[in-house]
């Protein structure tokens, strides 16, 4: 999903209270494609947060959303160490974290 | 009003005094006690008495309030206080705010300070607390925390990877930055890493924290404080030390495409290699009437080695394409084209959130650094990028 302005068509990420192009408030959600590419990534080896046991990989993902002036960026979480290359293909999955809590996640296409 | 009325006023104010505490892992003192110790040292260095101080400026992250500090110093009444941020983006802007207070007649002698128990108290590198609520704040944590993006080191790792991809950055380049800072600390008895050398093998063998960043790419954690006294330049000339004239100060948030609010939304911006520091630099040099070639020595904000690397092109010392070659030529070393972080920086002296860099920038134009650049007259100092940042040029009087 990507926040989109109904007045001028601007797509913006992160979502804001107003359209940053026309200052309008008529904002809605547009479906984003379920595929993208790796923009950057890191393998976290040093655990900080007990909810995220190290090692794990965080992917920063570019998704081409129709109407957007540049790729819309999302995050992905992959347990363990992976060594992707910038530009590698990723796909969208939905993961249930807890009862009633589902997050979109991006994983490497294999 | 004419455009002239909005013009920056170079050299109108000066830093007249500097002071620090010892830099330790466990101060055993309150943050206010540390702030008072550094402030008293700066006031004494300037040849002033606490009663002369009528203003304070601090970082928004500071736990020592101006009122508590004034009270601890026995100052009866303060006429001006202010703060800016966020965190390490603040120190140069804090000096700018002090200058604004002085030039607008709101204060005469302003103490600018940063104090923290950064090791024994609140450890900033821990990032977002595990129990933090997400959603609704300007930091947009809800877009980052659920995927495990929770600390500054992980954020800067993402920037480093892009510099590797776009400009050929390698771990050898980052190692050179870490080792340069360590050598300056080895010459500085006050530095936390004074007695510990670092070889390339030491760097490469330090454990990976968030790839491609290793432990020695990370700054220290420090208990301590640093402070300076800002006053008008005519007043500073009547005081004890050779004044460090404030040639220019600049702040920038960068373009709105960099994302609003706190640090993490920068990852949503169009480019991870086009940050606020570039615009701050343009503004800074224009106000100063100087160019990068005029800079004799620089204290570049170094929460991580990558932070230094990305500022080299932004502050005009090389192109982004040439930045790796610039570093590997030895440019950052004493005797090089751009000696940096001459007290050891936050990588190897102390992590006082960039305030220690201001103290060292003053020492360079006074000629009193432990790694003095001979004849240094133009001294650049920067505060943390991104998302907002600030920077300052001091000149010798
Ligand atoms: Zn709009």
Image: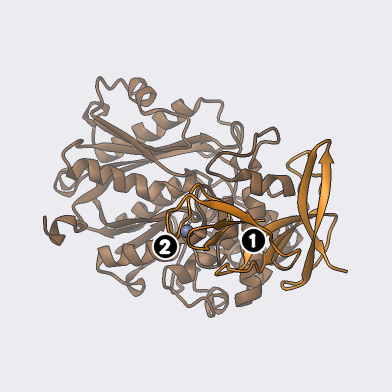
Chain colours: A orange, B brown
Front-most of B48 and B257? B257
Look at the numbered disc 2 and give the secondary structure of its residue. strand
Label at residue A73:
1
* B80 left or right, relative to B188: left
Chain designation of label 2: B
The quadrant the C terminus of chain B occupies is: bottom left
- Residue B133 position within the rendered picture, expressed as x and y whole percent measured from the top left: 65, 34
Label at residue B298:
2
Dot 2, crowdedness within 10 Å: few (<14), some or many (≥20)?
A: many
Decide: is B325 above or below B162: below
Q: Nearer the viewer, mark 2 or mark 1?
A: 1
Q: Is residue B300 visible?
A: no
- Residue B188 position within the rendered picture, expressed as x and y whole percent measured from the top left: 49, 52
Mark 2 CB near ligand 1 (8 Å cut): no
Front-most of B291 and B237? B291
- Residue B137 position within the rendered picture, expressed as x and y whole percent measured from the top left: 55, 39
Look at the numbered disc 1 and give the secondary structure of its residue. strand
Label at residue B250:
none
Chain designation of label 1: A
* A71 left or right, relative to B375: right
- The residue positioned farthest toward the left in the image shown: B1
Which residue corresponds to the image point at 36% horizontal and 34% vertical from the top-left? Answer: B39
Say yes or no: labels 2 and 1 on the same chain.
no
* Quadrant assignment, res B179: bottom right
């Amino acid at each position: 999903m990507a926040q989109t302005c109904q007045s001028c068509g601007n797509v913006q990420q992160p979502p804001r209270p107003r359209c940053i192009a026309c200052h309008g408030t008529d904002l809605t959600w547009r479906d984003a494609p379920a595929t993208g590419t790796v923009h950057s990534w890191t393998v976290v080896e040093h655990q900080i947060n007990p909810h995220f046991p190290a090692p794990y990989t965080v992917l920063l993902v570019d998704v081409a959303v129709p109407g957007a002036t540049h790729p819309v960026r999302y995050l992905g979480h992959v347990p363990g160490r992976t060594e992707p290359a910038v530009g590698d293909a990723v796909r969208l999955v939905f993961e249930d974290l807890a009862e009633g809590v589902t997050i979109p996640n991006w994983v490497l296409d294999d | 009003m004419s455009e002239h009325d909005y013009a920056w006023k170079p050299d109108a104010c000066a830093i007249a005094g500097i002071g620090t505490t010892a830099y330790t892992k466990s101060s055993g003192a309150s943050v206010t006690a540390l702030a008072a110790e550094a402030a008293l040292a700066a006031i004494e260095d300037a040849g002033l008495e606490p009663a002369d101080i009528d203003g304070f400026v601090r970082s928004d992250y500071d736990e020592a309030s101006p009122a508590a500090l004034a009270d601890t110093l026995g100052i009866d009444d303060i006429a001006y206080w202010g703060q800016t941020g966020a965190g390490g983006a603040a120190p140069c802007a804090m000096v700018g705010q002090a200058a604004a207070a002085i030039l607008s007649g709101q204060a005469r002698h302003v103490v600018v300070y940063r104090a923290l128990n950064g090791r024994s108290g609140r450890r900033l590198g821990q990032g977002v607390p595990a129990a933090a609520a997400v959603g609704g704040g300007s930091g947009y944590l809800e877009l980052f925390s659920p995927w495990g993006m929770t600390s500054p080191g992980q954020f800067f790792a993402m920037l480093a990877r892009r510099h590797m991809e776009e400009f050929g950055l390698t771990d050898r380049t980052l190692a050179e930055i870490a080792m340069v800072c360590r050598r300056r600390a080895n010459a500085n008895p006050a530095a936390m890493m004074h007695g510990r050398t670092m070889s390339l093998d030491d760097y490469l063998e330090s454990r990976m924290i968030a790839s491609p960043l290793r432990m020695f790419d990370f700054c220290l954690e420090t208990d301590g404080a640093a402070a300076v006294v800002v006053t008008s330049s005519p007043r500073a000339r009547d005081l004890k030390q050779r004044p460090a004239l404030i040639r220019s100060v600049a702040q920038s948030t960068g373009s709105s495409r960099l994302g609003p609010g706190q640090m993490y939304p920068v990852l949503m911006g169009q480019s991870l290699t086009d940050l606020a520091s570039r615009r701050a630099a343009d503004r800074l040099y224009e106000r100063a009437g100087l160019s990068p070639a005029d800079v004799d020595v620089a204290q570049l904000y170094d929460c991580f080695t990558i932070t230094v690397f990305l500022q080299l092109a932004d502050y005009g010392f090389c192109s982004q394409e040439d930045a790796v070659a610039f570093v590997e030529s030895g440019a950052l070393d004493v005797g090089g084209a751009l000696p940096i972080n001459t007290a050891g920086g936050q990588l190897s002296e102390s992590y006082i959130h960039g305030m220690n860099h201001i103290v060292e920038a003053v020492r360079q134009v006074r000629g009193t650094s432990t790694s003095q650049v001979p004849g240094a007259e133009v001294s650049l100092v920067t505060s943390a990028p991104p998302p907002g940042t600030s920077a300052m040029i001091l000149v010798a009087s």
